[in-house]
Image: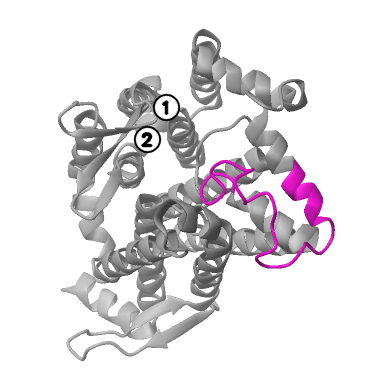
Amino acid sequence: MTTSSATFPFPARLKTPLQFDAVLLTTVLILLFGGFVILASASISLSDNGTGDPFYYVQRQLVAAVMGAAGGFVCLYIPMQVWRTLGPLMLFAGLALLLLVLVPSIGYEVNGSRRWIRLGIINLQVSEPARLCFIIYLAGYLVRHNRSLREHFVGFLRPMLLLSLASAALLAEPDFGAAVVLLATALTMLFVAGARIRDFLLFFFVAFFGMALLAIVSPYRMQRLTGFLDPWADPFDSGFQLTQSLIAIGRGEWFGVGLGNSVQKLFYLPEAHTDFVFAVYAEEFGLIGSFILIGVFLAMLWRVFKLAIRAVNAERFFEAYIAIGIGTWIGLQAFINVGVNMGLLPTKGLTLPLVSYGRSSLIVTMIGIAILLRIHHELVVDAKPVNRKRAKRNKRS
């Protein structure tokens, strides 16, 4: 089996140098460093007007990137077996974070949403680490109870009850978009693991109608939905964000107006550096640039899912499920963000992974990618003949 990998010499105390997936790492670095350029352009006016420092948000994002790189570096040295053992603890940690943020003295509220916990220099958006915790737990569950999942409804129901509790906590913040991403990721992992179609469809429709009901009975969610369906009916209120986003994308035409020359970012487009950074990018780099950015995301996701297939072929199902979960989460979040910017989906308030300003998202995404790189490392090392011989010797003994 051939793999695109690069070997980086690490300290001598390591038995085997870390093996990196060169394709995956390259696409991630393109998105990360390209994201800083896009963020600098999208936020410069807002930063200068609000703080007097034109690179205020870029500097804060850079600190988050350093923290994410440090956390990812540590995760590169943690064997996947350790993560598998920590699965139940990850479940507890994820649920604890989602419940703690609802406590008024702990949770930090912004614009009517209680989604953050203050941790020194950073406000942690708890849905981000909680999602990764649930992916790790669910991957272990799918390995331990795969037969029950395939043959009995209770095997499907157990994890979904826990994830439904987590989604209810997210909706209480409220964070509708994070709840959608969590449930969709979990259902994808269950489906790939062999959940029966009838169980999958039953929960899918229950979740879909439950989400639809919440949107109908909640005035602000209904306003977002109606604004998405016809933004030009009320372009200065419910449809304001989307109309400004569409104007930005339309101005970009084929090749864009040039880096730094966006007009919509000049206090016309709300959240230009977070939720709607893609619209600013499309205005400055045009349709061709947008295709390139989407292409880089697709290349990264192709590599992640190929990693999952390799893990399955090596009968490392825990690693395969984690790769599927992380790939689904990043891909779905990117799809939703771009879809919102283009008017294909209602506003959800989700960042564009590795690109938008969002420190919690960046840190956790980088840690998740480091775990993927660790999976690649273990697959490459275990595929070497010396390791196969050692495994045979261990079996004989």
Residue 341, located in which quarter of the rendered image?
top right
Of all residues shown, which one is farthest toward the top? Answer: 217
Q: Is residue 254 magenta?
A: yes
Residue 316 in view (yes/no): no
Q: Quadrant of the C terminus?
A: bottom left
Label 1: which secondary element: helix
Q: Which residue has dot 2 on it?
A: 147
Assess disc 2: are there few (<14), some (14-19) or many (≥20) residues with their C-alpha within 10 Å of its C-alpha: some
Label 2: which secondary element: helix
The residue under the point 53% across, 19% down is: 221
User: Are dots 2 and 1 in contact, CB under 8 Å?
Assistant: yes
Q: Is residue 180 above or below residue 33?
A: above
Q: Nearer the viewer, residue 24 or 241?
A: 241
Q: Which residues are magenta?
A: 247-276
Q: Amino acid at mark 2?
A: Arg
User: Which disc is residue 151 wearing?
Assistant: 1
Q: Quadrant of the N terminus?
A: bottom right
Majority SS type along the magenta span: loop
